[in-house]
Amino acid sequence: MKTTTLITTITFGLTLLFSSNAEAQKFPPLDKSPMDVTAYPNSNKEATKTIKIYYSRPQLKGRTLNELAPNGKVWRTGANEANEITFYKDMYLGKTKIKAGTYSLFTIPEKDNYTIIINKDTNVWGAYSYKTENDIARLVVPVTQAEDSLEALSMVFTKADNGIILNLGWDKTRIAIPFTE
């Protein structure tokens, strides 16, 4: 009786090993626009965050910024899914209060400024299903130009006197989005 149980267990184990092993090795290729996250405070040692954003980092690869984020059109501010920005406490964008929670971040690029949009829709792909009526806040911020060029879209939070700045940079374009407490 013990031999039958042992043989059954070994057969089952081998079947499971070979069948699941074959499926487990089918990994997708690396994403061309890898996902990244930035938060404030941006120290990994600081457990309590105030704000965090998940975004995909498209790369220029010989293209112009205007090709990838055309002026005058709503842009997901990255690649793939629309960004998700989480506020862990109530904050302001301009004069508009944003309650703690998770939202999407869209922008409308222009030559001299960007319109920043916080929208209540989440888990959306790109800006294809963007709905103006779901905007929570909008603010127009100026564009500055840097001397150095960034190949991949980059974001970082920095402390400001009365809040936090989300700094976006891509190519030579730089924008600073102020969130206040």
Image (cartoon, rainbow, N blue to C red):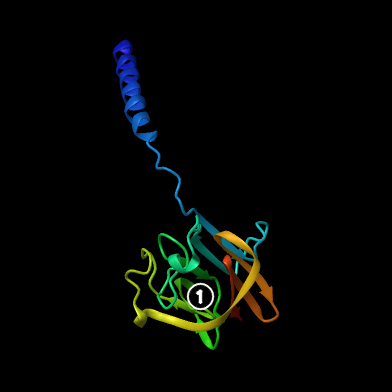
| Residue type, mark 1 in image | Ala
Indicate the position of residue 119 as horizontal and vertical percent values. Answer: 42, 76
Which image quadrant for residue 79? bottom left
What residue is at 56 percent from the left and 81 percent from the top? 141
> Toward the viewer: 175 or 70?
70
Indicate the position of residue 35 as horizontal and vertical percent values. Answer: 49, 55
What residue is at 43 percent from the left and 81 percent from the top? 136
119 to the left or right of 143: left
> Toward the viewer: 90 or 85?
85
Q: Quadrant of the C terminus?
A: bottom right
Residue found at the very far bottom of the displayed protein: 95
What residue is at 36 percent from the left and 63 percent from the top? 125
Q: Quadrant of the N terminus?
A: top left
Indicate the position of residue 112 as horizontal and vertical percent values. Answer: 54, 81
Indicate the position of residue 47 as horizontal and vertical percent values. Answer: 63, 60
45 to 104, vertically: above or below:
above
What residue is at 29 percent from the left and 13 percent from the top? 4
